[in-house]
Amino acid sequence: MTTPASRPKLKTRFKPARLKLSSDQPTRPLARLSLHDQLVAKVREMIIDGELAAGAALPERMLCETFGVSRTPLREAFKILAAEGLIELRPHRTPVVTPIDAREIAEIFDVMVALDAAAGHAAATRATADDIASLDAMHAELVALHRAAERGAYFRLNQQIHAEISKLAGNAVLLNMWSTLHASVFRARAVANYDASRWDESLGEHEAFMALLRARDARGFAQALSAHTRKTGDSVLQMLAQAKQQPGG
């Protein structure tokens, strides 16, 4: 049996010139996970952090050389990332980072605003004291990550908080719809936090709706949660429009 000490570690021999990655990124050592888990985490981070842009090709041979792995764990990682909506697997063609369709994103956010209103009201009505305490602990960690400027970890925890709220609604159909739509905007939603002012504003919105949840104000919580999603969607669309206007956009 392979022990954690003997398990092979993923090599991170990046070649910025070949992968068109920024060269000023600090070194971020990987945890002792399986090669598959390390690959998923690393490529996901590269996409969310913008090191791999929307539409960028992901040639298997080059990535295998870069990470020092075989094609098997890389292809398994690709399947997970494709399920998250971060990359597109194309038959007999090189996978690419999922392009972002602004019109589709706008339509999805329209639906998610309504879903969050419904989920928020149901969650606030059904949540136990333990449920609220758990969300409170997650929120406290979110605040700490914002203070430490840990953008990637903040974004992932942010998504976990929203997912937990949808679960607390206790409606399997609603949760399935929310999860499906969330996967479709996961990549685009990350860009909203690239703007420092929006990141600060977003945290303030989290503070506000958590206060309403603690107060058991179901209507206020639902309205604040859906308004937060609307503002996030507006920020995403604004940033996508700005990117399109830039040279090469």
Image (spheres, rainbow, N blue to C red):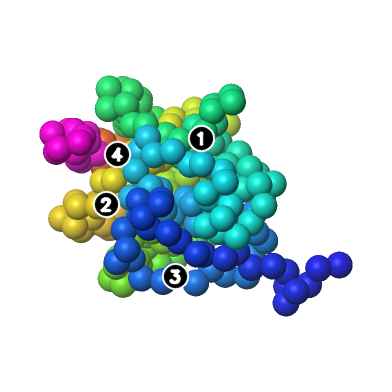
Give the left or right position of residue 107, taking residue 172 as reference. left
Identify the residue under disc 2.
193
Q: Amino acid at mark 1?
A: Pro
Do labels 1 and 4 touch, CB within 8 Å? no
| Front tag of 1 and 2 | 1
Question: Crowdedness of circle 1 by 10 Å Cα count: few (<14), some, many (20+)?
Answer: some
Measure the alpha-carbon separation of dots 1 and 2. Answer: 26 Å
Measure the alpha-carbon separation of dots 3 and 4. Answer: 31 Å
Instruction: Look at the image and give the residue range highlighted in magenta.
Output: 235-249
Q: Secondary structure at mark 4?
A: helix
Give the left or right position of residue 158, taking residue 174 as reference. left
Quadrant into which the C terminus falls: top left
Mark 4 vs 2, N-terminal side: 2
| Front tag of 3 and 4 | 3
Give the left or right position of residue 156, taking residue 94 as reference. left
Task: Write the residue at 60% across / 64% down.
Answer: 10
Mark 1 vs 4, N-terminal side: 1
Is residue 114 visible from the viewing direction of this image? no
Instruction: Decide which of 17, 118 is in the foreground and name it.
Output: 17
Q: Is residue 246 magenta?
A: yes
Identify the residue under disc 3.
28
Q: Secondary structure at mark 1?
A: loop
